[in-house]
Amino acid sequence: MKLKLNSKLVISYVLLAALLSLAMLLVSKYFLESQFQVYVSHKQDMKNEEILEMVSRIFTAGDGIKYDARLSFLSSFGDSLSEQGVVLMIYDTIGNLLYCSSLDKEKSCAHVGGSANMPEDEACSDLGGAYARKRYEIVRDGSPLGYVLLGYHKPIHYDEGDTVFVEGFKRAFLVTTVVFFFASVAFGLFMAVRIAGPIRRVTERTKRISDGEYAERVNITTGTAEIDELSSSVDHLAESLQTQFMLKKRMAHAYSHEFRTPLTTLQTNIEAIIDGLWPPTNERMESLLAEIFRLSRMVSEIEKLVEIQVKESSGLSVAPVDISEMTDRILLSFDSLTKQKGINLSHEKSRCRALADEDKFSQVIFNLVSNAVKYTDRDGDISVNTFERDGRAVFSIKDGGIGIAQKDLPYIFEYLYRTDESRARDSGGNGIGLSVVKAIVDAHSGTINVESAPERGSVFTVTLPASRS
């Protein structure tokens, strides 16, 4: 079963919260069972020091250790220690047991007497659990008077304060764990909405794009780089598809317009001749033939464009070509036309050899020069440059023509796109030439750029991989 992104995010946060809660439980258990035991042991040692100080004060008050005179006090003091889980045993210097709080209470610890040499960590099973002993010397004026053994059971008993602390810690930890768990779930839900929400909007937008709705934009900013890039990419895709759709409609309109005019002319003239309204003179027949040639030329250019677009660069007959010499030959074919319009056509050249299909690339130069001559006014200037730069062969042509508006620049290489219908028609343009140029350049793994402004002319720059041979 496929889960939605927000469900996966919530589940991942819940699992993470559970794992962290378990880790906190383990840490707490270690702290209580290990570290807190260390703390209680240290506190027990301090208590032992206080007991030793009290016993030493009693037995150093007179000469030697007198058991009978102090028995009453020791009995009361031992009872209080027993209630705290501590056994007090007092020995003289030769190891005779003088007092044992366990024996005083008639508890079964008979083996304590005479056991002064027992290891301190030996168990005393009749008292229950592990029984630890610590020995402390009783000294007066540098002379030993005896020693004290303080025994207590392990695990060490917690006093009332320790118990309150431990219980409080457990409650606080439990509350913190519960709050942390539900906070993680809430944060997981928040992040799921934060992340999955924009992605869901992008998904919905892509569905509408697939249905042909291109105008709407996602236009969201989340602060997450990947999601913002995805949103921007979808918006760019929608804009590109909308542009292509508009160009397709414009292309269909242009096709119908371009073909309708000569077809209408042929139809009306032929019908008039058939009906006997116009005589089939040579001049009229030549006019009809010109329209047929015009249709044929348009179909040929469209076929050529399709052929170039579907052909891979490997299908070209690529060889080292001198672009400068090729340009000189093509410029000669425009000599009469430039002289007729009074155009000054110059060519500044240097070494410029490229890997290209000579037949195909000569069409690129021809179309660009033809456009420059076509759109440059009388007595204008056209300058052509061919050179090499950074491992690329460069062909550049600058004209003094009518220029191109900024809004039209992104679309001038689309087939059947014309920047100005009236001027293009007057000059004989059909919106196919630059499309052919772009297709040929792309097939050569080259680039073509244009800089232009209305009434200030245009500069077209073509680059190809240079040839060193």
Image (tube, rainbow, N blue to C red):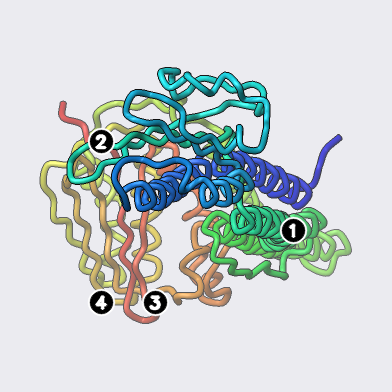
Residue at mark 3 = 402
| Number of the front mark, 4 or 2 | 2
| Number of the front mark, 1 or 4 | 1
Viewer-closest of 72 and 268: 72
Q: Amino acid at mark 4?
A: Asp
Q: Is residue 360 visible?
A: yes
Q: Where 211 sits versus 222, above or below?
A: above
Q: Secondary structure at mark 1?
A: helix
Q: Residue at x 28, y 64 (%)?
A: 338
Q: Determine which of the numbered discs, if any, sits on residue 182 in the image.
A: 1
Q: Determine which of the numbered discs, if any, sits on residue 148 in the image.
A: none
First in sequence: mark 3 vs mark 2: 2
Residue at mark 4 = 379
Residue at mark 2 = 144
Q: Residue at x 67, y 31 (%)?
A: 107
Question: What distance separates the C-alpha of mark 1 from that of mark 2?
Answer: 64 Å
Q: Amino acid at mark 2?
A: Pro
First in sequence: mark 4 vs mark 2: 2
- Splitting the image into 4 quarters, where does residue 265 fall? bottom right
Question: What distance separates the C-alpha of mark 3 from that of mark 1?
Answer: 70 Å
Q: Where 108 sits versus 458, above or below?
A: above
Where in the figure is residue 191, as x and y percent of width and height? 67, 59
Q: Where 155 sits versus 387, above or below?
A: above
Q: Residue at x 61, y 58 (%)?
A: 165
First in sequence: mark 3 vs mark 1: 1
Q: Secondary structure at mark 4?
A: loop
Question: What distance separates the C-alpha of mark 3 from that of mark 2?
Answer: 121 Å
Q: Secondary structure at mark 2?
A: strand
